Amino acid sequence: MKRSLYSVVGILVVIVWAFPVYWMATTAVKPGRDMFAAVPQMVPLHPTLANFSRVLDDPIFWQAARNSVIVSACAVALAMVVAFLAALAVARFPFAGRRTFLVVVMVVQMIPHVAIVIPIFLTLGDLQLADTLPGLVVSYLAFALPFAIWTLRGFVAGVPRELEEAALIDGCSRMQAFRRITLPLIFPGLVATSIYTMILAWNEYLLTYFLISSPDKYTLPLWLTHFVGTEGTEFGPLMAGATLIAIPVAVFFAIVQRHLARGLTAGAVKG
């Protein structure tokens, strides 16, 4: 009985979460008269790809897509390197101020993003990085690193030191013990953290809105505002653009999720 109840609750939660995505995708293929019909159409009766053609024919879309790929890739790569080294330091090596560092990381994570937009804007202005893609990457790191460090610290701390010590006794160097023993066990954490950072960087709008003013530096979320004007909102192209923007994140998650499950299983067997 309880199992059936849980299944029903799970199905309801999935419907609530998935319906906005379904509505976005179906609206993207509806012509204008169907989009504003008196009776909402759950299933498109006259599907069209005109809205997608409007998006794909826009040269600014491709420029924004290129900017989003560059910024997201750089943010994920830098966040993984910096967060991993920081997590390794606080989890493996005792040093003065370690607890204070962890408390500061946690407090920074709790601060609302909108509260530090202005300080970031002023700082990047002093560094001549405002309205630049490198400045955007740095600002994304300010939001991604606290969560990444805290998460990876847990994965690093969860790997027993005895495993590394056994590898050292068997003749491995410290670097070989890390590469052959510790790194594979931490791999699921790296994957999970990279997913979070990728989603954060790809979908970020607020920071980009404040830091970027040149159209050639727009990322995809900021580019979508082109369809919201003083004379109204072009819902068809807007939904088509939002659908196209969501596809890379979904594909990335689908690819990485397989590695995540495989890594978790391998870790369980080794543990």
Image: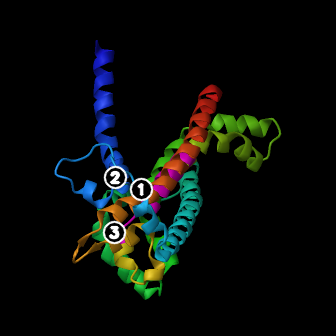
Q: Is residue 98 visible?
A: no
Q: Residues within 10 Å of mark 1 (few under 14, many from 20)?
A: some
Mark nearer the viewer, 3 or 1: 1
Q: Position of residue 238 (x, y in %)?
A: 35, 64
Q: Main secondary structure of the magenta part?
A: helix
Horizontally, residue 206 falls left or right of residue 49, namely left
Circle 1: residue type: Thr
Numbered disc 1: secondary structure: helix
Mark nearer the viewer, 3 or 2: 2
Question: Measuring 38% from the left and 51% from the top, which residue is drawn there?
Answer: 47
Circle 3: residue type: Leu
Q: Are marks 3 and 1 in contact (CB under 8 Å)?
A: no
Q: Residues within 10 Å of mark 2 (few under 14, many from 20)?
A: some
Horizontally, residue 190 falls left or right of residue 13, namely right
Q: Earlier in the sequence, mark 3 or mark 1?
A: 3
Q: Are marks 1 and 2 in contact (CB under 8 Å)?
A: yes
Question: Measuring 28% from the left and 43% from the top, which residue is drawn there?
Answer: 42
Circle 2: residue type: Met
Numbered disc 3: secondary structure: helix
Q: Nearer the viewer, residue 266 or 49?
A: 49
Residue 24, which numbered label? 2
Q: Earlier in the sequence, mark 3 or mark 2?
A: 2
Residue 243, which numbered label? 1
Q: Nearer the viewer, residue 17 or 145?
A: 17
Residue 206, which numbered label? 3
Q: Is residue 86 visible?
A: yes
Mark pair 1, 2: CA separation: 7 Å
Mark pair 3, 1: CA separation: 19 Å
Magenta span covers which residues? 191-207
Name the image quarter holding the N terminus: top left
